[in-house]
Image (cartoon, grey):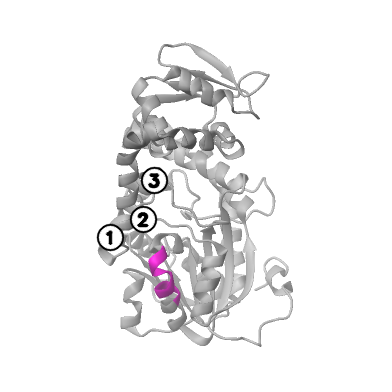
Amino acid sequence: MKKLFHDLFSRVEGMPFSITYPDRSTERYGGAGEPTFNLIFRTERAMRASLVNVDLGFGEAYMAGDIDLEGKLTDLMTLVMTSDLLGAFRKVVANPLNVLRHLPSQARVFWHYIYQPHTSANDKRYISEPYDLGNEFYALWLDKDMQYTCGYFKTPQDSIDLAQEQKREHLCRKLRLRPGETVLDIGCGWGGMLIYAAQQYGISGVGVTLSKEQAEESNRRIAVAGLQDRIHVEHADYRDLPKQGRVFDKVVSVGCLEHVGKENHDNFFRIARDSLKPDGTMVLHTIGRIKPETPLAFGNKHVFPGVYTATLVEITQCLARLGMRIHDVENLRLHYSYTTQRWLDAFEAHADQIRAMYDEPLVRLFRLYLSHGVALMRHGKNELYQIIITPGIDNARPLTRDWMYVQEGSH
């Protein structure tokens, strides 16, 4: 096993690193220079798991403490993104001699993606698992308003609180909000977008979330802000919106499309379209990909069950089928890299407290997830799209983007 790993790592170039094997020997790879990090395999079992499924096997071995790291996980993830390390591992797995060992992990992936449909019951469970860890957990490392989506950075030095406020303002401008308008927020999280829009733009509205914890905390915050007569959050499924027959001036959805499932994209946008007045506007904020890929098994199992990241082509084709029009697309990929780096820094600052609240495997899980997120966005493996959409032609829309970038403080 050690010889096989040595041969694999010897092919990797671009960043000096070292590996400590279960026999406690350490080898250097990746070129000349001091190792950027040292990856430690504590057991042969961890090596086998990583070989059989480099994603799920490695991640679970790291969570269990059978794999450790001296250095930054973001450096390891950068090496993964910028070298052919994953490709080398997958070629070994593709060897016929390894097929039988590989089948069980592939069967688990197949079960997740084929036999776990996005029904209302499954989606409620998918959302509850990550978000019902508790509001106190997320409050430790998100911004003060607990926005669990990409911020908007005007400079790389912006704080996470400032970036999230700028994101809300950016979205409000794209929606072209006016006092007295009504807003529907699909997948509203902890209600930060609705509260900001009500305070700064004088709107009224409704948010929906499948997380009971989020709905309760959102309505508590709304009451503290004295906005309960104008906005509220419902613990509800977006698929139930048509039964209520409500229509709104504007619809916003931030970080929700990823959770609805590829098979539900048409229905999601149909419901958004039918919830809009004929002259209304929707803004979609979503993670995207350049080309379709099966989601990573580790993230699907341990972080966001049922997640699917759509390509821009998939989104535009879906909107075209429904007769909806795209007016603007902005890619905030680097903004998300800065966002996840801020989250990671805050998470590490509170790691001891989180460990006392939960356990070491959860600390390792989120450290790995956030480090992976930083590298994914920094090296262009994922995108972050904001898309302005209308149900019809909308010839009244301004001819330029100047309205999106007016002077601060003027709405």
On the question of residue 149 being in view, the answer is: yes
Q: Earlier in the sequence, mark 3 or mark 2?
A: 3
Predominant secondary structure in magenta?
A: helix
Q: Secondary structure at mark 3?
A: helix
> For the magenta stretch, what is the residue range?
262-269
- Tell me the SS state at disc 1: helix
Question: Which of the pair 382/183 is nearer the observer?
Answer: 382
Magenta region includes residue 11: no
- The kind of residue tagged 3 is Ala
Q: CA distance from mark 2 to mark 1?
A: 9 Å
For the C terminus, give its image quadrant: bottom right
Is residue 36 shown above or below 172? above
User: Disc number at residue 306?
Assistant: 2
Element type where label 2 sits in the image = loop
Q: Earlier in the sequence, mark 2 or mark 1?
A: 1
- Is 266 covered by the magenta stretch? yes
**Foreground residue, 408 or 346?**
346
Residue drawn at (61%, 20%) of the image:
35
Comparing 257 with 167, the one in front is 257
Quickly name the residue at label 1: 122
Provide residue 137's location: percent of width, then percent of height: 38, 45
Q: Quadrant of residue 389?
A: bottom right
Q: Amino acid at mark 1?
A: Asn
Front label number (3 vs 1): 3
Q: Which residue is mark 3?
A: 297
Which residue is the extreme one toward the left?
Answer: 121
Residue 353 seen in render: no
**Quadrant showing the N terminus:** top left
